[in-house]
Image: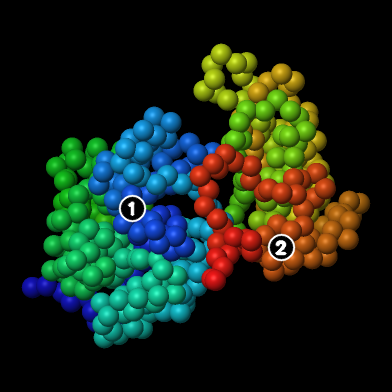
């Protein structure tokens, strides 16, 4: 006898944008429709996203573009640099639309989110999933797939089915009974199950598990003893018993901004400017979550791939006498730190800034003898408000490059249609 889940008070959905980066490019450049597309990583290094057409042709994920350039030209694959301002803005628009369908939304990544439907008793979730897809497509131009199930893990499975069989499912698949759950779990391979990595796969296959259904047939005690509470929760979730809940927003314990340079540099002034920009970014993230930090760590690395060059990797930590979220203080200390670890003659490829020792800005131990300049708080607030209003970094510190925030090799970059006024499409 099969159990129906449709009467449950709570259901989950996973909404996933199809080939998100490529879809964002197609929204503003219709000539790219049905054309194979490849999106490159930072500094135009390797392929990080492909359209379905590019996958069919045989372009692999992670392919170094300098090795596959001729292949792309021969197969008419359009190769583009990562346009993160565009992708980030389009992602924000999609997530805002999802909040119109339920207040319980967990943004899982730039292109997917979990939704929880509490009290949606006797809803037609197939119809509701179609409403979600149609509204996102109409308002943003981004195609999506929706998987609905009584748990988060099962909604992942349902989403894979919707993505794999678009004609049969119309982009929406609902697991609403024990019968549909078992059928789905028998279809999905063990390596395709959300949360099961290679190490766990190996041990489960030794136990004879080939599918997600095989995993659910193992005893709870064996899973707990062999793995951990995390794998046990995943097993119960796949059985239809909710154990993996929506993540609540948490304050980060450390915030990092690290970037590889477009080329190698031995110019201290260039590296100081980069480190100042990274430190400012960390400070802005601190203020966004209402936090301050006690320490800043600065890292500087040479190019480890160039074995013929002298190598140097070093980091330095600086402590503050009081917690701060000021871009001025954090940037100053970060620049001083990088000056002390920089070695003349070394060609550096990567730098990073980490702020840690994080506390809530409105609740920390005061220092009787040391405190931050009271002018910093209103100044930082004013800068954040202006930058937020104009959707770009209009105000920067004096030691930052006024033209660019991230200096990357982006020789195939498309216009930033939604975040840069000069790139907005003009209708004649």
Outermost residue, right direction? 369
Q: Is residue 415 above or below residue 13?
A: above
Tell me: 364 left or right of 204: right
- Of residues 149 and 31, the one nearer the viewer is 31
Tell me: 66 left or right of 388: left
Secondary structure at badge 1 equals loop
Task: State which tag comes first along the sequence, 2 or 1.
Answer: 1
Outermost residue, front direction? 428
Q: Confirm or deny contact between disc 2 and disc 1 (CB under 8 A).
A: no
Quarter of the figure with the N terminus? bottom left
Residue, x 67% and y 48% (percent of image)?
Answer: 405
Residue 194 in view in this figure? no
- Of residues 424 and 252, the one nearer the viewer is 424
User: Residue 262's x, y, as percent?
Assistant: 60, 35
Q: Is residue 72 above or below residue 167?
A: above
Return the residue at label 1.
35
- What colour scheme has been applied to the protein in the rendered image? rainbow
Residue, x 45% and y 57% (percent of image)?
Answer: 25
Return the residue at label 2.
387
User: Residue 226's x, y, as percent?
Assistant: 28, 43
Residue 260 in view in this figure? yes
Label 2 vs label 1: CA separation?
Answer: 36 Å
Q: Is residue 100 above or below residue 160?
A: below
Residue, x 29% and y 52% (percent of image)?
Answer: 52
Tell me: 47 left or right of 216: right
Residue, x 55% and y 23% (percent of image)?
Answer: 304
Badge 1, how many Cα within 10 Å: few under 14, some, many 20+?
A: some
Secondary structure at badge 2 equals helix
User: Residue 84's x, y, as percent?
Assistant: 54, 53
Badge 2, how many Cα within 10 Å: few under 14, some, many 20+?
A: some
């Amino acid at each position: 006898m099969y159990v129906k889940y449709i009467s449950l008070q709570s259901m989950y959905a996973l909404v996933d944008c199809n080939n998100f980066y490529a879809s964002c490019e197609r929204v503003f450049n219709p000539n790219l429709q049905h054309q194979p597309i490849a999106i490159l990583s930072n500094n135009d290094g390797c392929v990080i996203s492909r359209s379905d057409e590019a996958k069919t042709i045989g372009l692999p994920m992670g392919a170094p573009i300098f090795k596959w350039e001729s292949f792309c030209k021969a197969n008419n694959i359009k190769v583009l640099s990562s346009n993160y301002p565009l992708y980030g803005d389009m992602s924000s628009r999609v997530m805002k639309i999802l909040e119109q369908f339920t207040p319980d939304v967990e943004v899982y990544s730039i292109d997917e989110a979990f939704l929880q439907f509490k009290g949606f008793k006797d809803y037609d979730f197939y119809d509701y999933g179609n409403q979600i897809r149609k509204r996102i497509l109409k308002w943003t131009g981004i195609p999506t797939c929706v998987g609905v199930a009584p748990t988060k893990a099962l909604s992942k499975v349902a989403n894979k089915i919707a993505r794999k069989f678009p004609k049969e499912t119309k982009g929406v698949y609902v697991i609403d009974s024990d019968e549909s759950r078992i059928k789905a779990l028998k279809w999905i391979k063990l390596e395709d199950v959300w949360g099961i990595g290679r190490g766990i796969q190996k041990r489960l296959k030794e136990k004879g598990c080939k599918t997600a259904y095989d995993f659910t047939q193992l005893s709870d005690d064996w899973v707990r003893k062999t793995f951990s509470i995390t794998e046990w929760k995943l097993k119960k979730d796949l059985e239809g018993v909710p154990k993996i809940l929506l993540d609540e927003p948490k304050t980060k314990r450390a915030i990092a901004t690290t970037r590889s340079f477009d080329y190698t540099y031995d110019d201290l002034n260039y590296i100081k400017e980069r480190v100042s920009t990274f430190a400012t970014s960390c400070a802005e993230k601190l203020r966004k979550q209402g936090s301050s930090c006690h320490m800043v760590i600065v890292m500087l690395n040479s190019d480890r791939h160039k074995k013929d060059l002298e190598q140097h990797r070093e980091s330095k930590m600086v402590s503050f006498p009081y917690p701060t979220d000021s871009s001025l203080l954090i940037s100053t200390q970060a620049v001083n730190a990088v000056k002390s670890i920089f070695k003349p003659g070394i060609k550096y490829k990567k730098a990073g800034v980490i702020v840690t020792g994080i506390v809530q800005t409105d609740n920390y131990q005061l220092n009787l003898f040391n405190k931050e300049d009271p002018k910093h708080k209103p100044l930082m607030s004013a800068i954040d408000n202006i930058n937020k209003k104009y959707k770009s970094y209009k105000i920067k510190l004096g030691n930052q490059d006024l033209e660019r925030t991230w200096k990357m090799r982006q020789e195939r970059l498309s216009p930033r249609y939604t975040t840069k006024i000069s790139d907005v499409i003009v209708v004649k």
